[in-house]
Image (cartoon, helix red, strand yellow):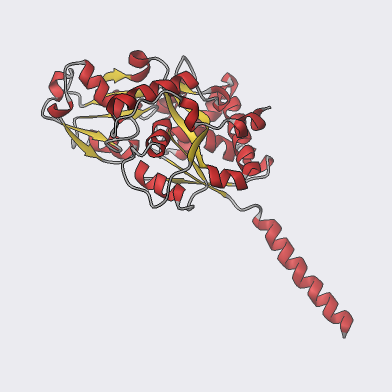
Amino acid sequence: MNSTRTLLLAAVLGTAAGAALAQGPKPLEVIAFGGGGNWPVWVAQEKGLFAKNGIAVKLSFTPDSVSQVRNLMNGTYDLGTTAYDNVVAYQEGQGETELSSPPDLFAFMGGSSGSLRFVTRPDIKTYAALKGQTIGVDAATTGFAFILYKLAAMNGVALADYKIEKLGGTPARVQALMEGRIAGTMISSPSEILPESKGYTRLGDTTTTFGPYQASIGVARHAWAAKNGDRLITFIRSYAEAMDWLFAPANREEAVSIYVKNIPSAPRPAAQKAFDVMFAGNEGFQRKAKLDVEGARAVLKLRSEFAKPQKNLTDPMKYIDESYYMKAVQ
């Protein structure tokens, strides 16, 4: 009888262990904006880089930066990719919304530099034509809105000359632009390719105007990272390996196929152009996801000019902790 019970117990335990093994590690919950900026994550999933390094990643998309920050702070998501400006905004009490607890967000790696375009309807060819029009933004006080305000101001158009409509992330803003609901918006590459192919106007370009600009970064909470440092390091390592793979010219066509698989609405020629935009020149994705401190300084300069309450922000490292990154790529 005892031997029978022992065998039954062993069978039950074996089944449970097998089920746990089959389930694998609990996925990291990652929240990002939709679009081609997720190319490295798609590659890391497709090429088994996360799995090779012992983690799984579940990628979810946020409708806007407010939702993203709230859900990072309440623990719904472990980490994400967002604008470096968003991290600074909330850490400095200049965010778009109040949070239920003091934020402890930090940037742990880079993502993309520059590659932000101010795109307008085909009929709007000058900044002066923006007067009286409605411009779309994610949030009015964070993200890339300040770039838009600065570009317009440099060309004689003040904030009071146009209306601002908060529409959320790039996909929603591009849709609103192409439906004629707004006159223009800032677009993160490579999402400008579709409207520009249809005659929409590029009025401004971040890198051309401001030089290096740290656009997207990896973001997490200090409290979460302190308890999950090994998982964060492994995520960064996998992401950096995906960047290495993407920057290899021999992988261009396979990378394009992965892009089209994840954005089925993108024609292959548009995906090929997206690759050339994001992996060549002095802007786009950053090699090994290395954050650009001088590009981050440019973000602070714009925020010091436009953010409320007004603060003179000068130290980009205040919002960055590269210790996890350094362990990941050593």
187 horizontally vs 215: left or right: left
Does residue 48 lie above or below 120 as drawn?
Answer: below
Does residue 180 lie above or below 212 as drawn?
Answer: below
Residue at (30%, 37%) from the top-left corner? 138
Residue at (18%, 19%) from the top-left corner? 127
* Image-quadrant location for residue 34: top left
Residue 234 position in % (x across, y down): 64, 39
Split into 4 quadrants, where in the image is the C terminus? Answer: top right
Residue at (55%, 32%) from the top-left corner? 321
Asked if residue 93 can be seen in this view, the reply is yes
Judging depth in this view, the residue of 7 and 128 nearest the camera is 128
* Image-quadrant location for residue 186: top left
Residue at (29%, 24%) from the top-left corner? 305
Mark count:
0
Asked if residue 201 can be seen in this view, the reply is no
Residue 68 position in % (x across, y down): 40, 45
Judging depth in this view, the residue of 35 and 140 nearest the camera is 140
Split into 4 quadrants, where in the image is the N terminus? Answer: bottom right
Residue 163 position in % (x across, y down): 16, 33
33 horizontally vs 120: left or right: right
Residue 202 position in % (x across, y down): 27, 20
Residue at the far left: name it: 132
